[in-house]
Image (cartoon, rainbow, N blue to C red):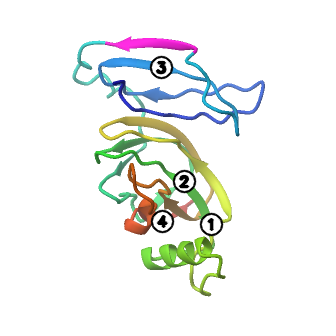
């Protein structure tokens, strides 16, 4: 069985992107897809062997480390605006992802999940519930025990982080298990 990791780079044609992925030893497949396309056959297989030397990732210029834990994000309450490199580490055993939305204010976890529940049930959310509208950035699956780094360039304002993935074989998104967060970005 191959290790599980999925990472997505959304790029416009003619532009470039980069990602740093800390791979565990094993065989990995690289596939190319486009939105709505079925997963293609692997275009490349590679083998990561041995252990990562201590300190190998210390040289990655990381501005923020965010733990994606057992149904929690651990964002600080306040972040500085501007370009940054974030290290996202999934310390849980199941895959997670990070979907970040702009918001009009800080929201409590109950306000976020209440707004999402109303939205998923087809009823208008309560006046104080969060409605995801302004997509800012997102990752694809980050497997348990894996770290990855992303570029973020946030404007001052309020943001809400959500994990919409369910557990394998489950139905409820991790958001309904508490995997939501709200924070402010200041100049």
Instruction: Look at the numbered discs 1 and 3 and tell me whether their residues touch, using CB distance below 8 Å.
Output: no
Classify the position of the C terminus by image quarter.
Answer: bottom right
- Which mark, by number, is residue 132? 1
Q: Which mark is residue 33?
A: none
When asked about the image quadrant of residue 115, the answer is bottom right
Can residue 94 be seen here? The reply is yes
Label 2 close to label 1 by CB (< 8 Å)? yes
Asked if 78 appears above or below 83 in the picture, the reply is below
Q: Residues within 10 Å of mark 4 (few under 14, many from 20)?
A: many
Closer to viewer: mark 3 or mark 4 = 3
Residue 159 image offset from top left, x and y in percent:
55, 63
Question: Is 53 rendered above or below residue 73?
Answer: above
**Label 2, label 1: how far apart the Cα atoms are:** 10 Å
Q: Earlier in the sequence, mark 2 or mark 1?
A: 2
Q: Quadrant of the N terminus?
A: top left
Q: Is residue 71 magenta?
A: no
Magenta highlight range: 43-48
Q: Nearer the viewer, mark 1 or mark 4?
A: 1
Q: Is residue 106 visible?
A: no
> Residue 89 at x, y = what percent?
35, 42
Residue at left offset 23%, top offset 18%: 51
Task: Please tell me which residue lies in front, 4 or 70.
Answer: 4
Residue sticking out furthest to the bottom: 127
């Amino acid at each position: 069985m191959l290790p599980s990791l999925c990472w997505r780079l959304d790029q416009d044609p003619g532009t470039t992107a980069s990602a740093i992925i800390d791979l565990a030893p094993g065989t990995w497949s690289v596939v190319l897809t486009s939105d709505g396309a079925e997963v293609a056959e692997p275009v490349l297989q590679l083998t990561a062997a041995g252990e990562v030397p201590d300190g190998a990732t210390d040289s990655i210029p990381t501005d923020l480390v965010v733990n994606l834990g057992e149904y929690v994000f651990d964002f600080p309450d306040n972040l500085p605006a501007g370009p940054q490199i974030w290290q996202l580490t999934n310390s849980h055993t199941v895959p997670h992802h990070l979907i970040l939305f702009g918001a009009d204010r800080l929201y409590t976890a109950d306000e976020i999940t209440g707004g999402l529940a109303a939205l998923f049930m087809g009823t208008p959310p309560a006046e104080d519930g969060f409605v995801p509208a302004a997509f800012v950035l997102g990752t694809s699956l980050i497997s348990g025990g894996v770290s990855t780094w992303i570029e973020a360039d946030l404007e001052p304002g309020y943001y809400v982080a959500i994990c919409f993935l369910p557990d394998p074989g489950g139905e409820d998104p991790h958001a309904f298990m508490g995997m939501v967060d709200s924070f402010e970005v200041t100049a």
